[in-house]
Every structure is written in C-alpha cells, then in structure tokens.
Image: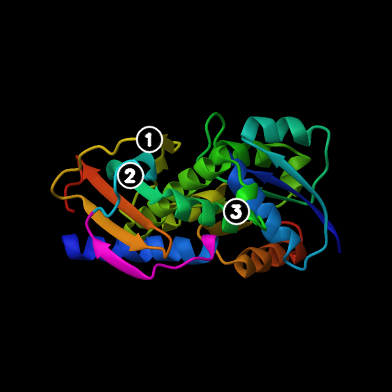
Amino acid sequence: MANEDGAMVLSHAARDVLEKMFFSCALTEAGGWQAAPGSHIGARLEFQGDARGVLELAIARSAARSLAANFLGAEREEEIADAQVGEVVCELANMICGSVLSRLDFGETFQLSSPELQAQRHEAGAGALTRSFDLGNGWLAVCVEFRMPYAGA
Amino acid sequence: MAFRVLIVDDSPAMRTFIRRVLELSGLELSGCLQASGGDQALTLLRHECVDVILTDINMPGMDGEQFVSRLEADELLRAVPVIVVSTDGTEGRIHRMLSLGARGYVTKPFLPETLREELERVLEAPHGE
C-alpha cells in the first residue's frame, strides 16, 4: 500500500469518526504532526492481527474538551471532568484505529489494546502514516505506524 | 413497545454515548443497564431481565466473542437478541459474530439513526432471526 493511499485511509477514517461520533469536522488537514508538545493530550494504543503496529494521537486541550462535551452530551464544556476528557480522547484513538484497520481489512480480525494516555509522543518510523486536522480550536494529530510482519505503509 | 437494554462496553464514555443515543432515538426505552465487560454482564443477567444486549468486542477479561458464545450456550439467555457495536468492521469479524449468535452488528463510528434502525430491526424480528 503506497503512503498516499494509507494517508487517504487515515484521513477518511479520522473524519468519519469526528463527524459521526463527535459531531465535529476538520476545517483543514495537513500531513505531518501538527501538535506542539505540552499543549496537547496524547493517547496511544497497539494493534495486533495480520498487521501489527501502534496508533498515537495528540489533540489540543481546548479541542479535546469540546469533543468530550459533544460526545458526552454536556451542555457546558466546564461540566466535563479532566478524567472524562481523557477517557474520551482514548475512545477517539480507539475508534480511529479501528476504522483505519477496518478500511484496510487485511483479511484477519484485529485486536486493539486498551488505549492509554501519554505525555510524550514516541518517534515514529519513516513509513508511518501521519495526518493532522485543524478542528477550529486546535489541532488533532494522528500517526499510525505498522510494524512487522506488515511493512507496506 | 418499551424495551430494556443492557450496554456492555469497557469504556464508560462509550456507554454514556450509546445510552444518550438511545434516549434521543425516539424509541421507548424503559430501562438501561450497563456493564464494563462480559463477566459483569453475565452476573447482572442472573438477576435482571433485558430485551436486548448491545456489546463491544475488544474488552479486557471476557471479550465480546466469549460473551456472545456464553449467552448462546445458555438456555434462557440465548433468547435475548445481541447487537454487536464495535470498531471492527471487517467482513471476517462481522461474519464470525453473527455465526456465534449475534443478531445484529453496528460498526463504530455510526450515525445515531443507524443504531436505531438496527435496534428496530432486531427487536421486531421473530425469535431466531
């Protein structure tokens, strides 16, 4: 799978999740990781199956709180506890990862680890798929790195 | 007709989301129970009756596949229809869950109306379909 195709799959998957589950949309999109360290909430999960790898994402704190309010149906963003924002960010990572893998459909079922919040992003390899989305009140950056045995990205 | 649902998902946020979708769906919801995994769901079902179960697959402990298999193996519980709600939308997984006994499947992300329509289809179907 060429990197271009993979980037398109990631883009479609992320946009689909944002629109359907978070009632949000990306104003613009860019390649690369558009997330300044320290101002974002990060999450990570691993996937296994016919393809193995890692998904990491980072989302601006303001954007994360907005998405959490949308997802949980809160009338005011201030109602949402920090822990709940973290849970929603983990669920965002879970759904984007599942959507990417489902679209690629390697032929075997896949397993996702429980997403975990992380402060620091790990350096991804050259073949990783990375896209960033401007949500209006901050960026969401997503990186999917495939590891052996699948190395087609 | 009012129905009682059990939502099985290890994510509290996702359980809240699904409950909210159901409450706003226009369907008549008479009760909404929640469990964080298959083990807790089975314990709950010993004492509570529900009309439909919505379950995730990837959960720690007893996962969705094991849970659906356990329900199907139980003489009483196999009558309760199960709809899988999962991020895994691959053909292989969908086929597998339906072959284990699930009556419906909704892939995340989903539009609220998609879940409502699947619920209506499953609840209105004669037993065994």
Q: Earlier in the sequence, mark 1 or mark 2?
A: 2
Q: Is residue B11 above or below residue A26?
A: above
Q: Is residue B80 left or right of residue B88?
A: right
Q: How many marks?
A: 3
Question: What residue range appears in magenta?
Answer: A22-32
Chain ID of residue with mark 3: A
In three-dimensional space, the C-alpha distance between marks 1 and 2, rounded to whole angstroms, equals: 9 Å
Nearer the viewer's eye, disc 1 or disc 2? 1
Chain ID of residue with mark 1: A
Out of A45 and A58, give the one closest to the viewer: A58
Quadrant showing the N terminus of chain A: bottom left
Q: Is residue B48 left or right of residue B16?
A: right
Label 3: which secondary element: helix
Q: Earlier in the sequence, mark 1 or mark 3?
A: 3
Residue position marked by numbered label 3 in the rendering: A77
Is disc 2 surrounded by few (<14), some (14 to 19) or many (20+) residues within 10 Å?
many
Is disc 1 surrounded by few (<14), some (14 to 19) or many (20+) residues within 10 Å?
some
Badge 3 vs badge 2, beta-carbon distance below 8 Å: no
Label 1: which secondary element: strand
Q: Is residue A98 magenta?
A: no
Residue type, numbered disc 3: Glu
Q: Kindly tell me whether residue A65 is visible in this rendering.
A: yes
Rendered location of residue B20, percent (x, y):
69, 56
Residue position marked by numbered label 1 in the rendering: A118
Residue visible at 25% across and 53% down? A33
